[in-house]
Amino acid sequence: MDGFADLDFAREERCGFPEVVFGAGKTPAQVASIMQALAAEHTRVLCTRASAEQADTVQALLSDAQWVSSCNLLYIDRRADGARLRGTTASEVLVGPQGEGCVVVCCAGTSDLAVAQEAALTARLMGSHVNLLTDVGVSGVHRVLAHADELRDARAIVAVAGMEGALPSLVAGMVDVPVVAVPTSVGYGASFGGIAALLGMLNSCAGGVSVVNIDNGFGAGVTAHRINVPPARFAGAPA
Amino acid sequence: MDGFADLDFAREERCGFPEVVFGAGKTPAQVASIMQALAAEHTRVLCTRASAEQADTVQALLSDAQWVSSCNLLYIDRRADGARLRGTTASEVLVGPQGEGCVVVCCAGTSDLAVAQEAALTARLMGSHVNLLTDVGVSGVHRVLAHADELRDARAIVAVAGMEGALPSLVAGMVDVPVVAVPTSVGYGASFGGIAALLGMLNSCAGGVSVVNIDNGFGAGVTAHRINVPPARFAGAPA
Amino acid sequence: MDGFADLDFAREERCGFPEVVFGAGKTPAQVASIMQALAAEHTRVLCTRASAEQADTVQALLSDAQWVSSCNLLYIDRRADGARLRGTTASEVLVGPQGEGCVVVCCAGTSDLAVAQEAALTARLMGSHVNLLTDVGVSGVHRVLAHADELRDARAIVAVAGMEGALPSLVAGMVDVPVVAVPTSVGYGASFGGIAALLGMLNSCAGGVSVVNIDNGFGAGVTAHRINVPPARFAGAPA
Amino acid sequence: MDGFADLDFAREERCGFPEVVFGAGKTPAQVASIMQALAAEHTRVLCTRASAEQADTVQALLSDAQWVSSCNLLYIDRRADGARLRGTTASEVLVGPQGEGCVVVCCAGTSDLAVAQEAALTARLMGSHVNLLTDVGVSGVHRVLAHADELRDARAIVAVAGMEGALPSLVAGMVDVPVVAVPTSVGYGASFGGIAALLGMLNSCAGGVSVVNIDNGFGAGVTAHRINVPPARFAGAPA
Amino acid sequence: MDGFADLDFAREERCGFPEVVFGAGKTPAQVASIMQALAAEHTRVLCTRASAEQADTVQALLSDAQWVSSCNLLYIDRRADGARLRGTTASEVLVGPQGEGCVVVCCAGTSDLAVAQEAALTARLMGSHVNLLTDVGVSGVHRVLAHADELRDARAIVAVAGMEGALPSLVAGMVDVPVVAVPTSVGYGASFGGIAALLGMLNSCAGGVSVVNIDNGFGAGVTAHRINVPPARFAGAPA
Amino acid sequence: MDGFADLDFAREERCGFPEVVFGAGKTPAQVASIMQALAAEHTRVLCTRASAEQADTVQALLSDAQWVSSCNLLYIDRRADGARLRGTTASEVLVGPQGEGCVVVCCAGTSDLAVAQEAALTARLMGSHVNLLTDVGVSGVHRVLAHADELRDARAIVAVAGMEGALPSLVAGMVDVPVVAVPTSVGYGASFGGIAALLGMLNSCAGGVSVVNIDNGFGAGVTAHRINVPPARFAGAPA
Amino acid sequence: MDGFADLDFAREERCGFPEVVFGAGKTPAQVASIMQALAAEHTRVLCTRASAEQADTVQALLSDAQWVSSCNLLYIDRRADGARLRGTTASEVLVGPQGEGCVVVCCAGTSDLAVAQEAALTARLMGSHVNLLTDVGVSGVHRVLAHADELRDARAIVAVAGMEGALPSLVAGMVDVPVVAVPTSVGYGASFGGIAALLGMLNSCAGGVSVVNIDNGFGAGVTAHRINVPPARFAGAPA
Amino acid sequence: MDGFADLDFAREERCGFPEVVFGAGKTPAQVASIMQALAAEHTRVLCTRASAEQADTVQALLSDAQWVSSCNLLYIDRRADGARLRGTTASEVLVGPQGEGCVVVCCAGTSDLAVAQEAALTARLMGSHVNLLTDVGVSGVHRVLAHADELRDARAIVAVAGMEGALPSLVAGMVDVPVVAVPTSVGYGASFGGIAALLGMLNSCAGGVSVVNIDNGFGAGVTAHRINVPPARFAGAPA
């Protein structure tokens, strides 16, 4: 590790999942060396915003690392067979062994898909069952209403949207569970790289909506998973 | 007039309605003197953002001036009886003699009502029939859908909303006529006095939405009226 | 109701709690009339941002309405005795009949207290047990660490902070449950009415943090309650 | 379609024109597959912000797709001969079979031309006759005045401008029909990618101006067309 | 002077006019004491942003101080009779003894008048002949064109405007002398207290426009005067 | 010209110099065609923000076009020998035949040099004598003071600065002529591409400072020239 | 203390001075109760942003509390006679018993005086000798140069300025010690409540400048004192 | 030097260190020529933001120039052997001959390392002993607490952080010496290139924190060094 990083190996015990690597701004060698160190201590290792070049370097060192190129997620899963997740597309990962509870991740357009996948795979790797709904846009409200039953089945919902970011308000008006809103940088002109959607979501007129940073699918996935699957010490708590 | 204003008496001929007075920032005496000069040339005179004090001063000079306190609109209508509008509440004015075509003005909450009324009365005084719908909010989408038929009857729609400003997108996805969006300064925190709603509306994912300034019910009313009632020279145009 | 509001009586069934009244920008008479209509249909009614004048008008009509002046919350609770909450200070309300699960609401300074109380009482009225921790500031980190056990007991945490808004990051690094961050408008100069804290929280380096609007204690309370107490249909879900 | 898009085939009936594809951020293969699906249901298909690479891929699949490179517009028109539009330059498309009514699109400088063309071709493809005026700038006001008659012939006007964005105010002061203003990102320094023009247009002192997003020629074209050509059910309405 | 101010008595020699007092944020006593000290050294003393209370206190001490309440300007002129200016309205001051050259100050609306007067009186007191034109707005472009000859007579022009701030561009397109643009805080919504006008002016497409701060009529007056009347050492320079 | 531009050949008579071409965003062919048309009517033609590629295309058509690569200025000067300017570096152009009056252009650092040269050459080509001072920075105030005499010789001063933009205030405190301030986009972090310098200059505490857009050396050069050399009709005016 | 505050009595040992009370947003009773608790443990107690009403309430309880109304500072000093500071004006406090080392606090205008006094008194109460220089403005650079010797005597300098905030750059160019810059909210228009000055200072071209929040004289005073007087454990360190 | 730069050779005497070159925006030849001129007068020369290409050009001319590529710092040190620093990595430079006093530079993540190194090497080259601590992040607060003793040994601390920028508050709550905060542009979405961290640091609730520009490690290094090592004339001052 050459002194550039001082990993937090107690993170899993304290926060429920090992420290996650943020790939952007690190060299491929740094990412590889950090993931190797984490893999020596944990059965799951996750790196977000991983580039193709970082993935190559990591896979040369750790041959079981999987890269989902559509959302730049790189992961290692060394759990026992019945639990282990595999695959390099979002669909492959999501259909793995049964997860717990239910998180719905929904997004408005094709362009928001990468962020929605980051959220969905994060929650899935952390242990949740995830249902990913696409093309659920506000300008064709019937498409949202058509998913009412699937939304009611979710213990937590992630709503991803760019442009005016109205999807979370619409969804939150239909359910009684928390909605985690993710603004995306999709749009042009006065969308200001996602600020319009961010402000729209912060000002949602519907209750139960909270917001993560622009394009932060990872953060939404963590939050949704923590809502969906309580830590073990809460077994017996109201449910 | 004492030299402080050089009125544009040809405005009605050029733009279809006499010059409208913007009350804010003028003394009551200035407003009265300008309205008197306009009333000498035109049968209708309109002043927006008129305070109680301005209304009092004007009414002392022009006894037939009517003030709608709920949206700070002051007007004089000296047209013949079958056409003349009267009243000091929005409801009284809207139920007057038959207007032309149909403009729908809809708003989300009680707090947006003043802006919606400014839009509705402006379009009504200019000659349009106006249908004002309130409590049409995004977080209870069924309330919007319940008005689908009334929305389809409109030749132009004004959608007024604060907070995340999602109403125009939702409405525009249901109709095939222009939607004029008005952001309001209702909200708190990161609504930034209406900027969140403004950005949301500018970034609407639905076609046919255009936007006016924050709280500018007047501007929306003018635009909707011009869409709804074409100038006379277009008689015989496609309709 | 005189046509100015079209209440959403199905909200409780759909979203788990009756429609909540946002007091700001409404006249006392409007608030009273809306609360009366809601009280005819529900056993609990909540109004946020209620002024003393609004409270007086409501109490003249509905004598069992309670006003917590320190956070401008007005509520009616007509549930049976063992469940009914009473009191006009935050402490009185919080010590009522046993709530479900556990929500911790923590804040940094005396000046953030009103927002923290709004969050705490909202969650409490919706059914959660709430533990309110004050004076938990980042510049004296030992004060945060001293509450580690209470933080671990919570199924959901609300962290309220102004200025640089660092508290949620610090707290989220210590727990494995969701942290709902509330920026407050406390501060001066370049705090920009809470924007500094808002941005800080959106950019938290810790996982599991999501954010609500500036000073939006209500929204945080709703979200925390929904995390803490799942809807009944999830009984038997992972816990 | 491989599950990434759930097209809204009822859009044409509901909103008057088939769903329009937004090319930016989609792969060439995605665009081609979406356009093929739409072309199977509709006689006209439109894709905005289409790159040369996207155009190539689409044309390999759908040989009658036409790409107007100067404004990145890709379209298919399979209507009967007397109605069908053809051409790969703005001029060629605009001189096709007679459109309905009249929309004027005017812009200030050579640099705004692409946005103006996007607006003009959108309105033309939707059915309007369009008159495109260029080099109509505020700093040489005589050039605007010289077009007064053409402006009076229009049922709707689109005014495109960057820098200070003053053109819509000037034009709106000369006419009695709606003016749809389009700010462009042309400029440098404190133009902030079009924000200066956007703010200028939102604050227009002239009535009847509404605004679309920066560089959103498409949105302006839709709105102008909807003003110019009312839906069929309004035949017999005031005109 | 009690130590709170260290006046710059050499300013007149270095910069052509004595140090000018900025009234805002000073106590009446501080303003009076500073003006008294300046009056002991100079024949002209000027204080901008002077309140009624400040004016009263100064006049109690210096009986020949004149306050123009419409633009909050307070001045003392002790030059010889043929040169001395008098009066407490803008008109009275402007019609005094012959000034040098010609500065035109023009503004769009009644609401911009105070700022325009501050500019006009500043230039007048510094020695320029000033021609103040009001109601010169962009939405009635004929009103600007009607003043073409007066504009051509000016050696320097000050153009004052709020809202979209288009007047300077229009004027600059008609003349060959410098135009000093002053944005005003008149407007509402997205005018942002003058920022829209400021940005519009900075992005003017016309040459020869430079800009001063929002509402800074004083700064524009100084600049216009310096353009109009060169320092004495330039006698014989190109003119 | 193929219809894309409608040149304003009367600009020279009305505004004192032929229409200037803004190169950015135009194709080389468009620039060449416009410059050729202007060169047919005028003896001087100027194009700002001209790239190497644009310069090549223009020079292929108009062999006497000169390109100053250090500030991207392209010009043609076909005046008689004693007046004609030549050269492809700023120094070569500035030392040409005697200009009128005196404009000083000063800048703080090497990095501001391109903008300062654009201002200097613009004023020079329009007819002013120009003195260009470099390395005049605020953090070494003695370097500014050392130029006091040269500054006093100028009829107009252009002060160019990035970062905190303090140079214009410092210079304006030393002179009695107008100072035209040009903020540059030099800097990093919170300089925000020149906004810090722009705001600093707009808020200058010194009189006689007006500001042009970020990096707008051209605009400053025009303004300074118009101050320095009055139109011929002012011969005999105060000087 | 009634549970609303959990004071940090170990702050003095850890950070060198007892916890300082921030008066804004607290009730007079809260301030009094907190100061009483602190005074029981420490010989010095400081409250910033204290209003007259807060001062009255505190003095009723703690009769030796001193209020400096010109900068809203409230303090108690119970040290032994030779060290104790007294007085209710800045001058009275600053001339007390000898402080250590030397801090210079300089400001540009009368309007910045309150912030400069807050900085000066804070540093003085913490133990530094302080020299307060006023009317040191950039537009009269000779006034800054005249203080060169006093600036060289300081171990730390606080430079307070509003408007363009250029003073710290100018001062930092003259010295070799740290300069703590304090932007003030003095100014109007595009000063944006101190943002212009803040940005100017952050972008200072001179080395050794660091910045505190707008109007944060207290923060600058603490920093300057910590620079000027090292903690005791550094005795013998390089000096 | 060819006239493009007028170096300030007296800077070392006045400010304690020779003028430092800012590489960004200069050509390699300009940097080389400036460094050569400075090296002729001084024993140490420093250039920040130096690219590989600039370094190559300089080293061809001045063979003892050292380039630290990880933070783009280029320097020459020609002091006598016992004092001279050497090396092209941060570690090599920091372990050179004994520096004076102690500066701690700490940063949160690998991504902030370059900025932290710029600060550390700047302070080291100016003469301070520097202790560089990495991976000191807020979300794992124990890692900060583990360095408490090293922090107490520092006479000045530089705290570097991106994202929410909470590190300086946390550190300042643990010490009694000045903390210089450096926001970095690390982050995404609403971090806005470092603005979130900048605002967080300006609003720190802890005393003794001052801030430099985003990514300005150099500025922080200068300030920390000036705090740590007083100019020689202060020998005998309080320490």
Image (tube, coloured by chain):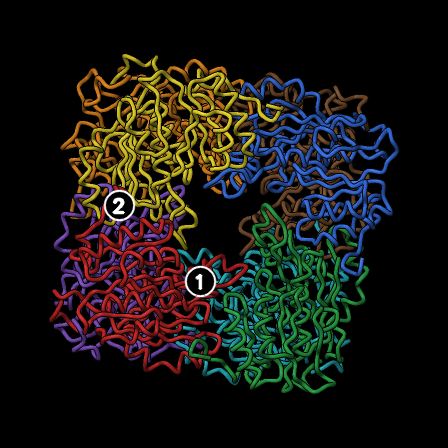
Chain colours: A brown, B green, C blue, D cyan, E red, F purple, G yellow, H orange
Would you say the residues marked 2 and 1 are in contact, meaning their CB atoms lie under 8 Å apart?
Answer: no
Q: Position of residue E67 (x, y in %)?
A: 34, 64
Q: CA–CA distance between discs 2 and 1?
A: 35 Å
Question: Which amino acid type is shown beneath numbered disc 1?
Answer: Ala
The answer to which of H80 and F65 lies nearer the viewer is H80
Identify residue for label 1: E197
Q: State the residue at coordinates (12%, 69%).
A: E235
* Chain identifier of the residue bearing label 2 in the image: E
Residue F141: give x, y in percent of width and height.
20, 43
> Where F237 falls versus G144 (above or below)?
below
- In this rendering, would H60 be left or right of F6? left
Which quadrant of the figure has residue G108?
Answer: top left
The answer to whether any part of residue E183 appears in the image is yes
The residue that mark 2 highlights is E5
Q: Three-letter amino acid code at disc 2?
A: Ala
> SS class of the residue under badge 1?
helix
